[in-house]
Amino acid sequence: MTIVQPVPLLASGSLAPAALARPSGTFAMVAMDQRESLRAMMSPHSAGDRVTDEAMVGFKLSVARELAPLASTFLIDRQYGYERVVAERLLPADCALVLAADALDQPGGVVADTDLDEQVDPQQARADGVAALKLLVVWRRDARREERIELAARFVARCREAGLASVLEPVTRPTPEEEAAGTFDLNGSIVEAAAELAPRPPLAAGAGRHDAGRSGMTATTHRPRVCVLHTVTTLPAVFAALLRQEAPGVDAYHVVDESLLADTVAHGMLPRTVRRLAAYAALAEEAGACAVLVTCSSIGGAAELARPHVGIPVLRVDEPMARQAVHTGRRIAVLATLPSTLGPTEDLIRSTAAQEGADVELTTSVCPGAYEARSAGDTAEHDRLIAAEAERLAARADVLVIAQASMAQAVGRLPSHRLTVPVLTSPQSGAAQLATLPAAQAAAR
């Protein structure tokens, strides 16, 4: 699974997912910002000697070398190892560096309270390559709750001013009274802490939620957000250019999950594929998207089945193409590189023709060798085979339908005199349907 462009998984529009997520859109964070607590953990293994600062730094650098290549984010403090991580460039390019910006009140090794570390310069951190700052907040049901909200607000604002993502790390603790009475509710306190410390509109103007999740607008651009879901890694760049042309009023983010197509090619349409696609749509809705565009025709049927599970449109990229095909001619030729795509496209055209009352005659072809050539990385051979098969089919048709968005480029390179019938591809018309969304039309006015 690959995320080719940043995915704003949080409805707040936070920079964190784009800055800190691993390619799948999830987080794999290595936290090495422990200070005295790390010294305490290492002490039993130090043969009775005090654990030195140098030993702690050495341990953190070893962790960075071993685990950072597997992580999306590496968190460290300025006191023990940060400068060497930066100077020695220990993190790979796809592992974001996060710097702890908390000053710890840590009597006896246990963090009792925190404040902002004034020795952390956000601008210098950004120049060092830091992607985010982190603040630990110790939350209790006591009289200082408002102070902690204000602390979180100052921290978020400081990060935003420096162009950094902000990571809040709430840790809930009982009050002395709760501890004595045995009434501390851990789960309840976590929920309360999250509700109080999550950025509210006054704290996140320009970058925060302000109910973006239900309006369908991104907080920073006031354009409707849309999710474009792909199964081929080359397509986000194609659709990014098309959306600028066909639907400039939308703010799109692109998700690529190649396993959706791989499973469909190997096993046909699986119930789990429908569930996974519905999950992507649900996440998009939570992220404030007003629609999802699925660019893979092979999973078009799954897109339709996912629709009842979310409150936003789930669009097939090939639906406009199918409507155009049945209105263009009776003899329709359909070309694909995969049987898993040919079947859904053929079904879509037949069902569209029935809805439109059109009498159509379909000729179909799975281009021999094209999928194998693409899988082997031979794009030139893939394109040559598609072009040759397209010419053969077009000679006996009124209109030629190219079933897969990934095939459009190959046919587009053919000289016009070699294809004497209209050739329909899904990317352009599929992208254009996003401009007709009510939210996009409202934003354009």
Image (cartoon, helix red, strand yellow):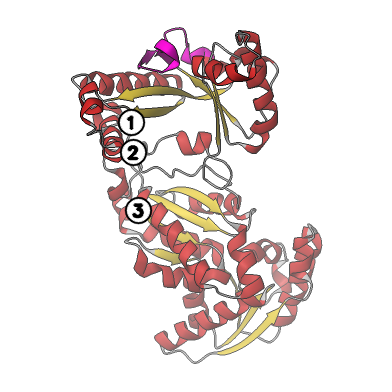
Q: Is residue 288 left or right of residue 35?
A: left
Q: Is residue 88 visible?
A: yes
Residue 266 x, y percent position in the rendering: 66, 72
Is residue 119 covered in magenta? yes
| In this view, 286 is above or below 334 | above
**Residue stretch rendered in magenta on the structure:** 102-124
* Residue at numbered disc 1: 206
Q: Is residue 318 visible?
A: no
* Residue at numbered disc 2: 219
How far apart marks 2 and 1 lie (CA) works out to 6 Å
Which is more foreground, mark 3 or mark 2?
2
Q: Amino acid at mark 1?
A: Gly
Q: Earlier in the sequence, mark 2 or mark 1?
A: 1
How far apart marks 1 and 3 lie (CA) works out to 20 Å
Q: Residues within 10 Å of mark 3 (few under 14, many from 20)?
A: many
Q: Nearer the viewer, residue 356 or 237?
A: 237
* Residue at numbered disc 3: 440
Is residue 433 covered in magenta? no
| In this view, 257 is above or below 217 | below
Q: Earlier in the sequence, mark 3 or mark 2?
A: 2
Q: Secondary structure at mark 3?
A: helix
Residue 232 x, y percent position in the rendering: 63, 58
Please tell me which residue is depicted at 50% across the width and 80% down the height of the picture. 348
Residue 201 x, y percent position in the rendering: 25, 32
Image quadrant in which you'd find residue 363: bottom right
Q: Is residue 406 left or right of residue 207?
A: right
| In this view, 102 is above or below 313 | above
